[in-house]
Amino acid sequence: MPVYRNKENGTWYVVARYEDWKGDRRQKCKRGFETKREAVQWEHEFQLQNTADMDMSFSLFTDIYKRDIAPRLKPSTRQTKEHIIENKILPYFGNKSISEITSKDVIAWQNEMLVSRDKNGKPYSPRYLKCMHNQLSAIFNHAVRYYDLKSNPAAKAGSMGEKDGGNINFWTKEEYLRFADEMMDKPIFYYAFELLYWCGLRVGELLALTPGDFNFEEGTVRISKSYQRIKRRDVVTTPKTKKSNRTIKMPPFLCEEIRDYLKMLYDPKQTERIFQISKSYLHHELSRGAAAAGVKRIRVHDLRHSHVSLLIDMGFTPVAIAERLGHESIDITLKYAHMFPSKQTEMVEKLERERRN
């Protein structure tokens, strides 16, 4: 057993020998253990993790999982995953051997999440419950696919929550215009909300915009990046999906508004963000404006839903709407299907004529 005592200070250290991913023999030294037992336990866990032995604890495997997927994730996605893992999953499963966790254990965890409350004393939303379960299942799927775990107990247990967690909330054009009138005394927010409503942008896409993204001769705005505030740092990444990279045509009135807004800024650089505001401040101003206008309270993201609702009402197809929003057309169809006018009667009439001809 490669565990040794440091004669100078009485602590213990480990020299663990292992084989790296290239097949080369290496060793790792870990110092500072107060007792021999702690050193032996660390060496045992290190070897389990290094060989990806499924007798390791769930907590140790999540370290492998995060290491494997981190290079493929955007910072905001990684932060969300880590929060759910650390706060909702590890407290329940962390010390259990990953190979011994059963679907019964997962059901017990689901039941605990269903009765849990957030910091405001409210139950978790169906969407968040779904997100938590999907994250747990993703960890087990990773173990099954790449590390020979026999099965995924989360898949056997079945999901909880709902993807959309209820009806889509949006403003009608009339509601939005009443709200916009109330925002005109705060230009930065007025113009931000104008772009969100009339172009259907995501909030991160809006906050990443620079003067160089606008082509007023063509009447377009280019969406090629997304802004997040992560751990007190400004982070600009590529958009959410490949489809999100797109160029959006703006109506002439909006081109004029944004041209006026850029003139208000003090010598902005072509690569400088034009909306130096936070998401929380946007939410605050939306709530204030909604109350002043006497319209229902919605989220900032619901302005994107409002844009889709407007386009549907104007008669545009799912394919055309998906291209503008940076979605797959099937996503638009599935998410907003209830908003599209029913074509059943027209279909039946045409089928009747086809049969009689």
Image (cartoon, rainbow, N blue to C red):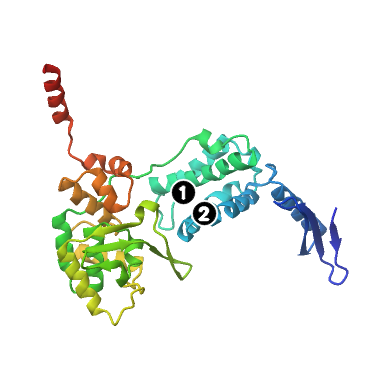
Give the vertical position of 330 relative to 45 (above or below): above
Q: Residues within 10 Å of mark 1 (few under 14, many from 20)?
A: few
- Residue type of the residue flagged with mark 1: Ser
| Residue 54 falls left or right of residue 234 | right
| Residue 333 falls left or right of residue 241 | left
Give the vertical position of 191 relative to 140 (above or below): below
Which residue is at the far top? 356
Q: Residues within 10 Å of mark 2 (few under 14, many from 20)?
A: few
Q: Residue at x 54, y 52 (%)?
A: 85
**Label 1 belongs to which residue?**
116
Q: Earlier along the polypeptide chain: callout 1 or callout 2?
A: 2
**Label 2 belongs to which residue?**
72
Task: In this rendered view, identify the residue nearer to me: 356 or 277.
Answer: 356
Residue 137 locus on image (x, y percent):
52, 42
- Residue type of the residue flagged with mark 2: Arg
Which numbered tag is attached to residue 14? none
Task: In this rendered view, identify the residue nearer to me: 238 or 74.
Answer: 238
The mark closer to the camera, 1 or 2, is 2
Q: Residue at x 72, y 53 (%)?
A: 20
Number of dots carrying numbers:
2
Q: Rounded to the nearest whole Å, what is the CA distance between mark 1 and mark 2?
A: 31 Å
Residue 26 locus on image (x, y percent):
77, 57
Q: Residue at x 21, y 64 (%)?
A: 219
Assign a secondary structure to mark 1.
Answer: loop
Give the vertical position of 340 relative to 71 (above or below): above
Query: Is residue 294 at least partly visible in the picture?
Result: no
Which residue is at the far bottom? 266
Residue 290 locus on image (x, y percent):
21, 62
Which residue is at the far right? 7
Query: Is residue 204 at least partly visible in the picture?
Result: yes
Task: In this rendered view, identify the residue nearer to me: 4 or 35.
Answer: 4
Assign a secondary structure to mark 2.
Answer: helix
